[in-house]
Image: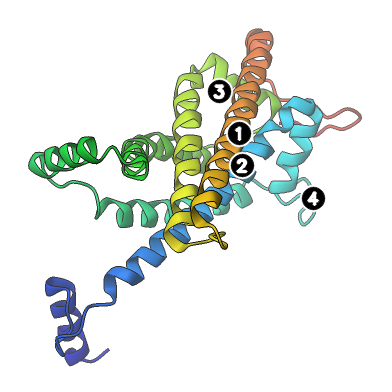
């Protein structure tokens, strides 16, 4: 990139207009990237919770799914490296989305106070949902960082017994409970706001369709909270039963493989 182009980009980012006095396209591009990374993370979360709920089908089902993500179909026995790579990719998208979202957060108490006053006067549902996203987003930034760090540094400790020991005996259930509630709420609100922002499914009657979308997303959010909580309880039950054998790994029937 030439020096001239760099200077033009700097001017555009500072004043919101190009050197030709045209409206800057940078905010729109950043909004698009924020939406794209948010949608990617939302889809990941939805599949992640479903995969975690495999424990509800039994320890063997959860074990086999873990081995699948470890690349057991490529490398004999699998390797935790595949988990690390996946967690690293998710972390990069997670950080990028967080940084892009933070640019819209109130940067001072005065801005926050002004927003709250505006929100109370309007009592607008979508405005209140945005504020809910801000709160849950801040919580997820810290809670999610701990979870991702744990996955990347201890990828070998994922499995029916290993995960249950971490959740129950190591007391991580508190963090996972808070993370589950905040991330599912944030995802549900985020998908709804994406649909509204980009006009997906507006159809011939946007107002009527908006009400339908609200009901569908509320039902889906409740479903994910339900199976997430049910899975967490299942892991805690297994962890409680396994606490006297803490550190022992799950043995697949008829195999020497452990996890």
Position above or below: 19 against 118:
below
Task: Name the residue that disc number 1 marks.
Answer: 224
Dot placed on the residue nearer the N-terminal end, 3 or 2: 2
Question: Gap between marks 3 and 2, in whole Å?
Answer: 18 Å
Between disc 2 and disc 1, the foreground one is: 1
Q: Are marks 4 and 3 in contact (CB under 8 Å)?
A: no
Name the quadrant of the N terminus: bottom left
Q: Residue at x 56, y 16 (%)?
A: 168
Question: Is residue 1 visible to us here?
Answer: yes
**Mark 3 to mark 1 CA distance (whole Å):** 22 Å
Mark 1 residue element: helix
CA distance for labels 2 and 1: 11 Å
Disc 4 or 3, which lies upstream in sequence?
A: 4
Residue 129 percent coordinates (x, y):
37, 40
Residues at circles 3 and 1 in contact by the CB criterion of under 8 Å: no
Q: To which residue does mark 4 refer? A: 76
Q: Is residue 247 left or right of residue 60?
A: left
Quick check: can you spot residue 87? no
The residue singled out by tag 3 in the image is 166
Q: Which residue is mark 2?
A: 48
Cα distance, mark 2 to mark 4? 24 Å
Q: Quadrant of residue 241?
A: top right
| Residue density around tag 1, few if under 14, some if 14–19, many if 20 or more, within 10 Å | many
Q: Answer left or right for 157 relative to 106.
A: right
For label 3, the crowd category at 10 Å Cα-Cα, with few meaning under 14, some 14 to 19 and many 20 or more, is some
What residue is rendered at 52% in x and 56% in y? 40
Q: Quadrant of residue 249?
A: top right
Q: At 61% across and 16% down in the image, what residue appears?
A: 236
Quick one: 118 or 208, which is closer to the camera? 208
What kind of element bears circle 4? loop
Q: Left or right? Give the position of 208 relative to 3.
A: right
Q: Quadrant of the C terminus?
A: top right
């Amino acid at each position: 990139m030439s020096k001239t182009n760099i200077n033009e980009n700097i001017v555009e980012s500072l004043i919101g207009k190009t050197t030709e006095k045209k409206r800057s396209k940078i905010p729109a591009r950043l909004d698009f990237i924020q939406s794209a990374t948010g949608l990617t993370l939302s889809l990941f979360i939805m599949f992640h919770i479903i995969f975690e709920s495999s424990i509800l089908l039994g320890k063997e089902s959860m074990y086999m799914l873990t081995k699948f993500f470890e690349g057991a179909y490529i490398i004999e026995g699998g390797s935790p490296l595949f988990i690390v790579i996946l967690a690293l990719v998710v972390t990069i998208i997670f950080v990028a989305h967080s940084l892009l979202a933070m640019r819209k957060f109130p940067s001072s108490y005065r801005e926050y106070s002004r927003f709250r006053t505006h929100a109370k006067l309007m009592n607008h549902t979508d405005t209140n949902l945005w504020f809910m996203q801000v709160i849950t987003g801040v919580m997820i930034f810290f809670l999610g960082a701990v979870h991702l760090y744990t996955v990347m540094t201890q990828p070998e400790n994922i499995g029916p017994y290993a995960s249950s020991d971490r959740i129950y005996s190591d007391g991580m259930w508190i963090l996972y409970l808070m993370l589950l509630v905040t991330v599912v709420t944030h995802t549900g609100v985020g998908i709804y706001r994406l649909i509204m922002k980009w006009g997906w499914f507006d159809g011939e009657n946007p107002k009527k369709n908006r009400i339908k979308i609200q009901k569908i997303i509320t039902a889906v959010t409740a479903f994910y909270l339900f199976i997430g909580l049910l899975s967490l309880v299942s892991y805690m039950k297994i962890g409680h039963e396994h606490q006297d054998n803490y550190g022992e790994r799950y043995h697949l029937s008829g195999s020497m493989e452990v996890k």
